[in-house]
Image (cartoon, helix red, strand yellow):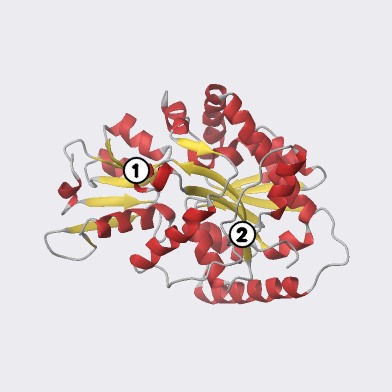
Amino acid sequence: MNRNRSATVLAVPVIAALAIASLSGCSRRATAADNQTPSTTSAASTLRLGYFPNITHAVPVLGVADGVYQKDLGSTALKTQTFNAGPAATEALLAGSIDAVYLGPNPAINAYVKTKGDGVRLIAGGASGGASLVVKPGITSVSQLAGKTLATPQLGGTQDIALKYFLKKNGFTVNGSGPKNVKVVAQQNAQTLQLFQQGQIDGGWLPEPWATRLQVQAGAKTLVDEKSQWPGGQFVTTNLLVSTTFLKEHPQTVEALLKAQVQTVQQIKKDPAGSATQLDGALAKLTGKHLPKGVAAKALGNVQVGWDPYAASLQQTAEHAVAVGLLKKPDLAGIYDLTPLNNVLKAQGLQPVSDAGLGKRSGS
């Protein structure tokens, strides 16, 4: 990874007026792009890419660190930025601070809705699985969650909605009162580990490696593996979201990015043990600390890296957000544009992926 081009941020504060201006501006730019087909397109001079320093983002973490992304981008300079959770990442994308970002499905849906379907497109998956509800060892059944305090990475993020939907489905109230109330707090993952070690919280619905870290470093136990909540255990955890302006103006750069992703996924699957070691080193450069021994390998084993967006699970994810009051029922038609990805897959003799009827072709 080019350290001089890499910056780590844990939040992107945006004041209300700037957020409104950013969203409306993004929508205007995207609408113009949708109505006008550029006569020529070219490689971007720079690609500003966001992702999280998590195992669920193993593909960009490794692909950036080992230089595969920069190599496939060629003359396009790669600049990276890391985030703690999806809402902050989408703020950066909609404000024009980055061009593309790996993130969970719920923040991607929110960005699509905020820009009225004009500002962003999902162009690939990145991972499935890798999220669990881990709790104190004395909590051995779901019924024992009553009266407990549980953490998620950020309000409105993918794990936040997953936990709140799970609690609602099991008859609990959230941040209210009564005998079946559960307090849910949104905070940075590192803080969750610290507070769990101090006994101030009872667990959390967390992405990898944090679910594994609470187990290894603080004695937590897995109460719910999110895979158990989905048909066949397959659901999207990480997507690649890009601004429509960048997608339309620099399609060859987008395909180069996707080529790098496919190459990185293949390498991880070819050598998972070696990839886990490399991943630990890459995360240490981003966070300043190595993971405890064995955590990277165990956590990576809980994640299915890939490029399939598992588009069929996206609609259900949106319904979960609606059910817990964090989203109005959205129209997701057109949220995907998998044409660039399928072009890359076809060139390599690989099977295309489906948008489950939620797709929009490039240039349309």
Label 1 residue SS: helix
Where does the image place residue 187, in percent across and percent down from the top left? 37, 53
Label 2 residue SS: loop
Relative placement, left or right, of 341 versus 183 is right
Where does the image place residue 240, in percent across and percent down from the top left? 60, 51
Q: CA separation, marks 2 and 1? A: 26 Å
Q: Few, some or many C-alpha atoms within 10 Å of disc 2 (few <14, some 14-19, many ≥20)?
A: many
* 124 and 249: which is toward the camera: 124
* 64 and 286: which is toward the camera: 64
Tell me the quarter of the picture where residue 96 sits. bottom right
Where does the image place residue 119, in percent across and percent down from the top left? 63, 68
Residue at x 62% of width, y 48% of height: 353
Relative placement, left or right, of 6 versus 356 is right
Residue at x 53% of width, y 42% of height: 57
Farthest right residue in view: 39
Tell me the quarter of the picture where residue 63 sits. top right
Q: How many marks?
A: 2
Q: Which residue is mark 2?
A: 336
Q: Few, some or many C-alpha atoms within 10 Å of disc 1 (few <14, some 14-19, many ≥20)?
A: few
* 43 and 320: which is toward the camera: 320
Task: Of the two numbered discs 2 and 1 on the same chain, state the one appearing first in sequence.
Answer: 1
Q: Quadrant of the N terminus?
A: top right
Residue at x 44% of width, y 62% of height: 318
Q: Is residue 278 above or below residue 158?
A: above
Q: Amino acid at mark 2?
A: Tyr
Relative placement, left or right, of 275 versus 3 is left
Where does the image place residue 274, in percent across and percent down from the top left? 56, 22
Q: Amino acid at mark 1?
A: Ser
Tell me the number on the disc at residue 228: 1
